[in-house]
Amino acid sequence: MQITTRVAKTGTLALVVAGLATAVVHGLPEPADVAVAPTVERDSADWTMPLDAYAMPAGSKSDYAENLLADPCLRKAGIDDPPPWATVSGLQADSDASDTDARGNPSPALATTRPLTAALAGTRGYHGPSTAGANRQGMTAWGFDADRNAAFAALPDGVAARCWNAARKTLGNTATGHVQEASEVAKRLTRLAALDARRDEAVVAAAERWRSCMEPSGVRDLPAAPDGMPSPSMGVGPTDVSVETGIGSVEIAVAKRDVACQTSSGYRKTLYDAEWNRLLHVTASDAAVLAATEPDQLAVDARLDRTIERLAPKAPAGVD
């Protein structure tokens, strides 16, 4: 099955399955029959998906990298107040934790659709990567500092803007409306493909094998499929919020078995194939949005990472 999307008159995004036209009140859905070329290589280990290169990088990384690059220019203008420390991984994790469909975002971060990895299971169980490196407290204090903001207000018109515009140009981060629209389409369709792939007959059958493999884990309310983990009885809480007080050994053991069972049951491969294939065709409307820009956001993301790693102040010891 191919997934198709439409926006109803109420503004609500509806997910329908091609062929089930009777379920649509406001007319037939637009068919997803336009082929699109993948923007990345297939790689189930990294869970790459065809539209990934259209998705803009985390906003927190973009803002931080721009401020780091603009700092010398601003210092010449009289603003000698460089950004505080932060890390690439912390900023990325913080952005992913905030950018979820659970918070009503129809185009969430790509990370929210990717299954648990063996590396994460072995170190943090079901908890997401640490957000400590985002330095939220330090960033807030810096951004809202009264003296700093007064100094900006005293600058001649356009001076600060020129510094930031130059930084964005260097990073290739001057995102137009077309880039933003394509990013939203790519993330929305990737999320919908991930949800629809879980209902694929082959994926459902693999989930049953996964469940049999997981029965010795001792989880009393084992869900029907991996996307239901961690189950309520595990008491883990939100999986996208990191904890700094330590992860229980039981949680880690269950998470490691979970990933191993996903692999041995064929669930992981079957789910990946189903999701990838669903993203090879989109509606004509979405294809037009994607065609209006270049799929170059992975290159932008890499430049942001290199800039932050090169220019950011050192993080305190113990921050991951």
Image (cartoon, rainbow, N blue to C red):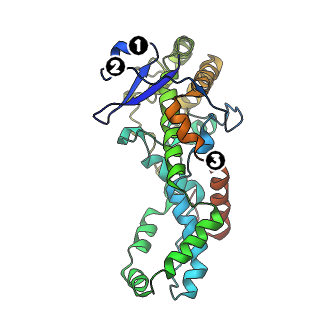
Specify the quadrant that holds the C terminus: bottom right
Quick one: 34 or 258, which is closer to the camera? Answer: 34
The tag on residue 294 is: 3
Measuring 41% from the left and 13% from the top, which residue is drawn there?
20
Dot 3: what SS? Answer: loop
Contact (Cβ within 8 Å) of mark 2 with mark 1: yes
Measuring 52% from the left and 22% from the top, which residue is drawn there?
197
How far across and how far down the image is residue 105, in percent?
39, 42
Mark 2 belongs to which amino acid?
Val
Which residue matches tag 2? 24
Mark 3 belongs to which amino acid?
Glu
How far across and how far down the image is residue 231, in percent?
41, 27
Dot 2: what SS? Answer: loop
In the picture provided, is 240 more to the left or to the right than 8? right
| Alpha carbon distance from label 3 to label 1 | 34 Å
Contact (Cβ within 8 Å) of mark 2 with mark 3: no
Quick one: 5 or 254, which is closer to the camera? Answer: 5
Marked residue nearer the N-terminal end (3 or 1): 1
Direction left: furthest residue:
10
Which residue matches tag 1? 20
Dot 1: what SS? Answer: loop
